[in-house]
Structure formats: C-alpha cells, structure tokens
Amino acid sequence: RAPLPRKGCNGIQIPQAGTSIGGLRDVIESGGFENNKGKLKVALGRDVSGVPVVTGLERMPHLLMAGATGSGKSAGINAIICALLLKHTPDDLKFIMVDPKMVELIVYNHIPHLLSPVVTELERVVPTLKWATREMERRYKVFARYGFRNIDSYKAAARRRADLEPLPYIVIIIDELADLMMMAPDEVETLICRLAQMARATGIHLILATQRPSVDVVTGLIKANFPSRIAFAVTSQIDSRVILDMSGAEQLLGRGDALFMAADAARPIRMQGTWVSDSEVEKIVTFWRNARPPEQAQGGERKAQGAAGEAAGSAAGAQAPERPSAPALQGPGEFLSVDEQDELLPEAIKLVRQHKRASASLLQRRLRIGYSKAAQLIDLLEQQGIVGPAEEGRSREVLDPGGRKQDTGAGWP
C-alpha cells in the first residue's frame, strides 16, 4: 500500500494467521474516542496500525454500510447503536429502527430512545420515512421562526431559553435496504434522498445497510447523497465498485474487516470493525429499560400490548411531539374509536383547562396513550373551539367558551 496511514512510507499488508477482534469497550475507553469533539461520536473500529477509528455522525452526516452475509455488517450496526446509547440520554437522542429481517434490531424494543417500536413490517416503512420528512420540514420552520441555522445553535439556545421546545437528534437506521427497494423503489429512493439532502441541519441522520449492494439497490442517487460509506467483505469486484467506486472490498477477510470511506477522504482506510457481544447489548438495553420513569414504562407496556399497528406516519401524527421525552409514532390503525372518544375527550378537556395549555405530549403523559391518539384529541378540541390553532414550537392556547384566549390568571367558571 502507498502510503501507509500516518506514515511517510509505503508498505505491504499481510493478513495475520489469527484475526484480532476489537471490543467496543476498548475503543470507547481509548484516548481517541474521549478526545474526539463530535456531538454523536461512534466507534467504528481500529485501523491497521491499531489506532481507534472514531468519528462524529454529524460529520458524516449519513452512512451507507454494505457487505455479504457474515462479513460483520450487523455487528457494526450494533456497535454504532451501543456507542450512542452509552453517551446520550433519551432527551438528547432518538432512534427510528427499521428491521425487515425481524431479528437484528428487535432487541432494542422498549428502550426510551425509540420513537416507535422497531419497524418490521414493510408496509410501515414508507409512512415512517414520510413522518421523518415532515418532522424535518417542521424543524426548519421552527428554526426560521426563531432565527437559527442548524440544530447545534438551536440546542445551545434551548438550554438557556424556556420558550424553545427541546429537539433531540434523530438517527434512522435501516438494516436491509434491498427489501425496501423491492417493495417501493421510487418512493423509498425519493424519501431517502430528500432526507439525506436536507436533514443534516435539523439533526436527523440516516444509516443504511444492505447485504446486496447492486445498482438497483444502491442507486446512483442514493450513493451520491451518502458520502460516508463502510464496505465489508463482498463477493465480487462489481459490488465493491458499487459501494466505494473502486475495487478492494472483494479482497477483505470478513468478520469485521472493512474499508471506511469518510466524507472528506480521498481514499478509504482499512479497519477492523468494532465487536459488541450479545450479552453487552443486553446489559445496555436492560439498563435503559429500567431507567425509564415508571409512568413512561407503564405507558410503553400498554402501547406494546394494545397497539399491534404502532408505527410512524399517520395523518394525524404529521406534527412531531412537542417534547422528546414521550413521543411515539402511531400507524394508520391507531385511530380513536367512538367509545374511546366518549371516554377520553372529557378527560382531555378537563386536563387542558386545568393546565391552561394544550399539547399532544401533555395528553400522552396524563392519559397514557400514543401520539397519534393524542394528536387526534387535540384536533377534536380545536374543532370544538376549546383550543386555538397550532403555533410552531409552542403549546396551543386554551380558549374560553366565547372563543377568546383563556386568562392564565383565572380558572374556568
């Protein structure tokens, strides 16, 4: 190889007889990880010199991963997720996970970082991406209203100002892109590319993975919008060229051996991907499940038992949650029934009058329902003249019976 990384000389790379597996803990505890200034630091592995490969997800800003079965792709995804979970609270970071294979990411269900349960049904993927697009557009409107250019300046100001709603980072992970592209190629490609082109400034990042890196899965448009790529071992030189625009990945050894092409790099670097065991994943997941507030945990259990169609993207859920601590994206099947309206609407009216403000997150917390149903209740309250219209970044005003704003200093008669 010419030249070797960080050395002023050429060299020859010879595979070792035994592969050295680098654990996630070793990389996270290294100085390279601690000294990295990234907001969303991820531990990718170690290069051929043993130096940790660490980068910030906001610098990528989106990542494409590809490799044959058994090449270490799923382990790489788990390492990225676990590194983020170890450094970020649910108030600061949210995940949307899509796992058509139904086995890789399902272990992360019920952690408080999830905006919705892991999406496993293909028909729910497009609504999920549409929700993410609407959330991106909503955040841009909030930024424009308050005069911010990106998520970093907004979050810095939100720590000092009570009138700004907290906006968490959102990481969307799609574990198998090929299944999506077979189902609805045009729509999936359009939504992914739109998010990849515009979502960076709003704090939304994409991680795509596939084990079939063909031109009909990783299209030219998708590849152009994902400058950061990781190629694990593939079966042919053609697959390598699809991922990296050059050969080399077909010569990798598997089991985490990878080529990482950074967005600002001219050539990829070879690295051994980070390994995280199933027991380590389970410990991290168990910690966050137990760390949830009791009210949120009970609400999550209720939603998991009664919402088989829970997902992203109902029409009523077009507006994202006001607070990041309790958002849950609901699927089209989660509409209020007549009986639920009769039961929940009087309670919702009582709550908004008592608190003198109205928001979907308030109804979620107090009524222990999903975001879609809470948003529908807010719409019903607006239709009945109890609350005012939506205002970007603010709770809705509660109106008195004459249609005027309620005086916050006096209660209802």
Image (spheres, grey):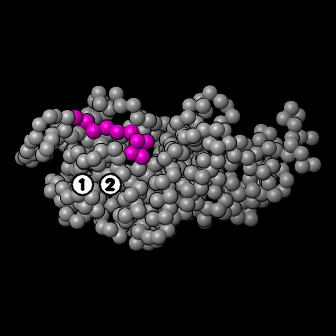
The spot of residue 80 in percent (x, y) is 35, 44
Residue 58 among magenta residues: yes
The spot of residue 202 in percent (x, y) is 54, 45
Q: Which of 357/350 is in front?
A: 357
State which quadrant residue 168 falls in. Answer: top right
243 in relation to 260, above or below: below
Per the model, the C-alpha gap separating discs 1 and 2 is 8 Å
Q: Residues within 10 Å of mark 2 (few under 14, many from 20)?
A: many
The spot of residue 14 in percent (x, y) is 7, 46
Q: Mark 2 points at which residue?
A: 65
Work out whether mark 1 precedes mark 2 in sequence or the reverse, and give the earlier one. 2
Mark 1 belongs to which amino acid? Phe
Q: In which quarter of the image is the C terminus?
A: top right
Residue 99 among magenta residues: no
* Residue found 46% across the figure and 59% down from its top: 193
The reply, left or right, for residue 386 in relation to residue 35 is: right
The reply, left or right, for residue 162 in relation to residue 196 is: right
SS for tag 2? strand
Magenta residues (range): 50-61
* Residue found 80% across the figure and 39% down from its top: 356
Mark 2 belongs to which amino acid? Met
Cβ–Cβ under 8 Å for marks 1 and 2: yes
Q: Mark 1 points at which residue?
A: 232
316 in relation to 405, above or below: below
> Can the viewer see residue 92?
yes
* Residue found 51% across the figure and 50% down from its top: 199
